[in-house]
């Protein structure tokens, strides 16, 4: 029963994050927040896996470093999009426009 809790909860939270990402496609900020939620759930899953298998936590620190870089890139894209288009709606601009 305890093993099902260890694997079931992160998988359930991951599926909720994927559902949030698919359903919120109006604003870039809401999509970035749902992506960060998915990354945190993956970190939770990785942390549980590494602790159950008695592995080192070095890979989890590397994963956190890359997730912080992903968040910084997403925020920089958001800022540049707001500066050029004035908002973060996906319907208000053409992606193929130079």
Image: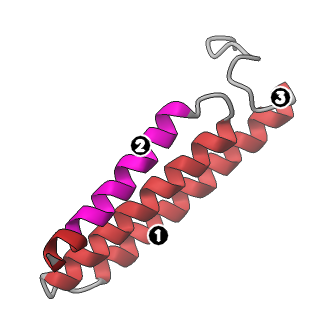
Q: How many marks?
A: 3
Q: Secondary structure at mark 1?
A: helix
C-alpha span from label 1 to label 3: 29 Å
Residue drawn at (44%, 54%), measured in percent from left and top?
38
Instruction: Look at the image and name its color scheme.
Output: secondary structure
Q: Secondary structure at mark 2?
A: helix
Residue 28 placement, left or right of 17: right
Residue 20 placement, left or right of 3: right
Residue drawn at (58%, 56%), measured in percent from left and top?
71
C-alpha span from label 2 to label 3: 29 Å
- Disc sitting over residue 84 in the figure: 3
N-term mark: 1 or 2: 2
| Callout 2 crowding tier (Cα within 10 Å): few <14, some 14–19, many ≥20 | some
Residue 14 placement, left or right of 72: left
Instruction: Point out the frontmost of discs 1 and 2.
Output: 2
| Callout 3 crowding tier (Cα within 10 Å): few <14, some 14–19, many ≥20 | few
Residue drawn at (15%, 88%), measured in percent from left and top?
54
Percent x, y of residue 31: 58, 40
Q: Give the quadrant of residue 27.
A: top right
Q: Nearer the viewer, residue 16 or 54?
A: 16
C-alpha span from label 1 to label 2: 22 Å
Q: Which residue is mark 2?
A: 18
The dominant secondary structure in magenta is helix
Q: Which residue is mark 1?
A: 65
N-term mark: 2 or 3: 2
Screen quadrant of the C terminus: top right
Position of 70 relative to 98 (above/below): below
Task: Report the magenta residues as a range.
Answer: 7-23
Q: Secondary structure at mark 3?
A: helix
């Amino acid at each position: 029963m305890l093993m099902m809790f260890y694997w079931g909860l992160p998988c359930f939270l991951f599926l909720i994050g994927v559902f949030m990402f698919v359903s919120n496609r109006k604003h870039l900020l809401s999509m970035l927040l749902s992506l960060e939620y998915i990354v945190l759930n993956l970190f939770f899953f990785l942390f549980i896996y590494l602790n159950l298998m008695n592995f080192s936590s070095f890979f989890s620190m590397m994963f956190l470093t890359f997730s912080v870089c992903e968040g910084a890139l997403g925020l920089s894209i958001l800022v540049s999009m707001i500066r050029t288009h004035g908002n973060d709606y996906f319907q208000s601009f053409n992606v193929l426009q130079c």
